Image (cartoon, helix red, strand yellow):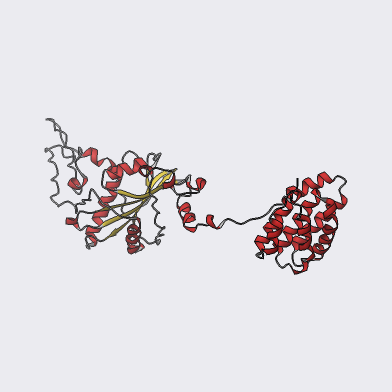
Amino acid sequence: ERSPAPLPRALRYITEPQGKASVIFLLGEYGESIQEAPYSLEKVIDNYDNIVDDGVKTALLAATVKLFFHRPPECQHMLGRLFKKATEDVSSQDLHDRALFYYRLLRSSPDPDIVKSIISKSMTMSTRQFAEEDDSELKAALMDEFNTLCTVYRCKPENFIEDANIVPFVRMPKEHPLPSDAPLAPVPDPGVNAVTDQLGGASITEQQGQAAPPPPAPAVTSGEVDLLGFGFDEPATPAPVSSAGSLQSLSLKASVTLSGDAYQSLWGSVPDGEAIVTPALPMRTAPSATDAVEASLKTFNVFTMASGELPTEFKFFLYGQEEDAFGGGFFLIQAIMLKAPASLSLTIKVSGGDPDPTKRKEKTDQLIELIKSSLGQYI
């Protein structure tokens, strides 16, 4: 059943190229039910030389060929004229090749149904995104949540996740490659990892710097003669414990709030040449996830700004702050845990606090020991 439609009338008033191409495409797609469709397209074909936009010409070719299969008597002659104009048109190579392909296919194929099937499947109307969907703010938010369901649902997390379950996004600081001559932190004795057990639970700052007393010499039995000078003739006395004072103590705040922007600003304010880099410390095993590591560090007042798991490593951006009575300086730490072979590398920058370089160095060394003690189950 054929019924009049407003499309032929709209074609006379629309001048914008994309709008005109869309109306022409619809006339070809639904032309079998629009009585005036062939005659509206014929007027456009007669005015072909005045068409400037290649998109309108391509839509006209596709619509006329498609309408030919539904109403061949009315479209045969005007399709022939369109083929002649399109194959002679040098303004668009794509249009020329399409017209030549359709013409040769129609002329050489013995079965019109096969030709109709091929041409119908190859004709698509390329349309751009609607203006309402071109939301630059939404695109930026989706890039921040790229590895989540936000990119599937095309909406922000607050649109489908309860506020209590939303994990805030924190951008990791940019990498800061250090020069090859950056100072390295000293490598402590391997036995220092068990220092907490040896001290019976005492804090590191209370015992650091004090030498452990040597074991007492064995008792001398009567009748023994010290022929080789081993000191058996007289009872050995224990060596006196050094009375030197302990190193500068390190006391970190139990509650610190630091934003991501502030972290990046503090990190960038400290020159890379002043950073302390530890050599790779071997680990017994790598953690299975970042949560356990963050919880262990938090018990020692070392907090996590951001963390993530990569195919070959775990990466942590950590921080802590001294008590105000000791200077109030910030310790900014980048920790990298390789999965295989398991190892830990630390890059530490100190911002603010005590200006004395010796005390800064002592506190940094204590911080390294503090981190190793908190990760004793892995190191």
How many marks overall? 0
> Which residue is situated farthest in the top direction here?
222
Q: Quadrant of the C terminus?
A: top left
Above or below residue 178? Residue 251 is: above
Is residue 165 visible in the rendered image? The answer is yes
Left or right: residue 131 versus residue 349 is right
Is residue 315 visible in the rendered image? The answer is no
Q: Residue at 66%, 55% (x, y): give it.
A: 126
Residue toward you, 76 or 308: 76
Residue toward you, 22 or 97: 22
Q: Position of residue 38 (x, y in %)?
A: 78, 56
Q: Quadrant of the N terminus?
A: top right
Q: Position of residue 283 (x, y in %)?
A: 37, 42
Left or right: residue 89 versus residue 141 is right
Q: Position of residue 10 (x, y in %)?
A: 68, 60
Among the 4 quarters of the image, the one containing residue 238: top left
Left or right: residue 299 versus residue 108 is left
Residue toward you, 231 or 57: 57
Q: Position of residue 260 (x, y in %)?
A: 35, 55
> Which residue is situated farthest in the bottom direction here?
50
Residue toward you, 151 or 58: 58
